[in-house]
Amino acid sequence: MENITENIVEKVELAADVGIKVANVVSNAFEATVADTDHSAGAEEGTLMNYFTSFGIHIAMVIIVILLKWQYDRNRYRYPKGPRDWRNIKDAISFHRKKRENLLALATDYPDSCTVITHVGRLVLLNDPTLINEIFIGRADLVSNKVDGYLENQLRYKEGKFIRTGIVFRHQDHNARIVHKALVQHLDSNLIGKHLDSLVQEQLKQMRLSETFDVRRTTFYFGVRLLISLTCSSTMSSIDDKAFELFEQNLYKISKVIHEDTIEKSAKIAITQLTGLSETLDINENVLDYIKTWIKYRHSDINRTEDTNNEQIVTSTTKTNDFLQAILDIIDQSVPRLDEDDIAACVLDIIMHGSEMLKGALSWLLLYTVKYPEEADTCRREARDNGYSTFNLSSAETLRQTQAFVKEVLRLSPVVPIVIHSTLQDFKWRNFHIQKRTLFGANVFALHHSIAWKESTKFDLTRWLEQDESTIPTHSYAPFGFGPRACIAEKYLFNLLTGIFAVLLYHNNFDKTGSLPEPTEGTFGLANMPPKYSLKATPLSTRS
C-alpha cells in the first residue's frame, strides 16, 4: 500500500512540474506572438485579444497547479477518519457550539481517534487513553499553550523568538524546558509550606463574599490576586491601588473575551487578521505593559543590590521568593536569550492560566455545593470537626469527604475538557502522515464519562472513598492535563482546592439567589466554565 501511495505522490509531483513547465512554455509562446505582431494593421484589436487570451491561460495554469498541489497533499498526508470534509462544516460548527454532546458522540463513534474540520483548522481528536498517553505524555514538550495564542497576540511577537509550544517529536524547545523546570523547582523548594499557606489564607480573608456575589467574577479576582502574589510578590507594594484595579479589570475583560461564543470570537479573529486592529490585542498590550513595568522594577532592584558594598549583607527581601525571580535566575541558560517581552509573556501565562483554572474549579465547586446541599453539608461538618478554619496545605489531605467532593466535581465538569496543541512540523505517527500546524486534542471530557466509570453521569462521592477508590479506572481521569503537560502544581492542586473549599464551607453557607445553571451548561473557551450566576453567602458563627 505504501509503495502505491509513494508512486501516486511521485506522479503527482511530476505532473505538477510538467504543469508549471507547460505554463511557462505557453506564456513564452504568447509573449513571442505578441512581440512579433504587426502593429501597423489592427494592432489595437490584436494586442487586446492576445492580452486577454494570455491572461486566461495564465489563470488556467495557476488553477491546474493549485489542483495538482491539492491532490499531492491529499495523497501525501493521511489522517484518522472522521467528520472532516468541508461539506460537514455544519458538524464542525456544532462541535464548538455544543462541545459537550459532540465530545461524547465523537468518542462513541470513533473510540480510538477521529479527524474533525473546525473553524480553526484540522483537529485530530484522541479518544483512547493509550493514544492520549502516547502523544501527550510520551513524546510531547513540557509547557502548555500560552494564553497569548488564544488572543492572537503572537502576531505581535518575533517569529521563533518566544517559547514555542505544541507537539514536537524530534526536538523540544530548550527555553520551554528550563522555564518549566525552574517553576516546578521554585514551587517545591520555596512555596510548599507555611509561605504558601499564609499567601492563600491572606487572599481568602480578602475574598469579597457579599450577601449576593457574582461567582465567576469573585473567584477570578481571588485567583488573580493569589497568582500575582505568587508571581510578583516584591512588586506588590509598588503598585498603586487604582492602577492595580485597572490591571485586574483588564484581565477580567480578557477572560470574558476568551469565553465568548466561539463563532462570534472567530469573526473577530478574522477581522483582526484582515485589519490588524483588535480591542483584545490592545487590552492584552496594556496588561503586558504593566508586567514589563514590574520586571523593570525588579531589574533596577537587582542592579542596586549589585552596586552595594560587597561587605553589606543582602537581606531576604532582596532575593525575592516568587516565580518572576525563578525565571530571571535562568536567563543566562536560555537560548535564544529571554528578553523583557519573553519574560512578560511567561508572567502573563502564569497569572492568566492560573486565574482561569482557579476560577473554573471554584465556580463549579460552588455550583455543585448548591445543587447537592446534603453532600456539601457533609463536607462542612468534616471541616468543622477537624477545626479547618484556616488554610493548611499539608492537612487538607485528611479531609477525605471534601477531597472526594472536589474530585467528583472535576470529573463531571473538568475545567479543561479538551487539551489541544498544535504540531510544529510534519511527522509520521502510526499509519498516518500528519501535516505541521495540525491540532491534536485529548478528549478529557469523554474519558471522564467513559464506560469505564460506573454510572458515569451520576454525582457520587463514594467512588473516591476508601474501598471504592481502588476501582477508579486508570488513565481515565486527568483534570489537570497529562504527564509533563500537566499544570506545574499538579501534585498539589487537589489539596489546594480541597483546603480553599473547606475554608469557604467552614465560614459560609451558600444559597441560590435566582435560577441556577445546570452542570451540563457552560462555555468552552480557554476553559470549561459554568454560565454566569450569583449566590448568597451567609457567614456562619465560629465554634471550637
Image (spheres, rainbow, N blue to C red):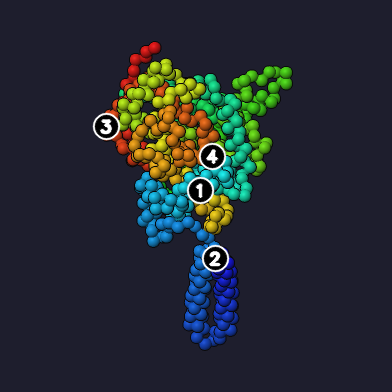
Read off the residue under disc 4. 483
- The type of residue carrying mark 2 is Met
Say which of 15 and 256 sits in front: 15
Side of 265 relative to 293 (left or right): left
Q: Quadrant of residue 161?
A: top right
Sooner in the amino-acid sequence: mark 4 or mark 2: 2
Read off the residue under disc 3. 514
**Residue in the picture at 60% in, 26% down:** 189
Spatial CA distance of label 1 from label 4 is 13 Å
**Residue in the picture at 50% in, 76% down:** 57
Read off the residue under disc 1. 131
**Residue in the picture at 37% in, 45% down:** 100
Sooner in the amino-acid sequence: mark 1 or mark 3: 1
Label 3: how many residues lie within 10 Å, few (<14), some (14-19) or many (20+)?
A: few
Sooner in the amino-acid sequence: mark 2 or mark 3: 2
> SS for tag 3?
loop
Read off the residue under disc 2. 1
Sooner in the amino-acid sequence: mark 3 or mark 4: 4
Q: Is residue 285 visible?
A: no
Spatial CA distance of label 3 from label 4 is 40 Å
Q: Nearer the viewer, mark 2 or mark 3?
A: 2
Spatial CA distance of label 4 from label 2 is 35 Å
Q: Is residue 488 visible?
A: yes
- The type of residue carrying mark 4 is Gly
Label 1: how many residues lie within 10 Å, few (<14), some (14-19) or many (20+)?
A: some
> SS for tag 1?
helix
User: Which residue is outermost to the left?
Assistant: 514
Check if mark 1's residue and mark 4's residue have beta carbons within 8 Å: no
Check if mark 2's residue and mark 3's residue have beta carbons within 8 Å: no
- The type of residue carrying mark 1 is Leu
Q: Quadrant of residue 330?
A: top right
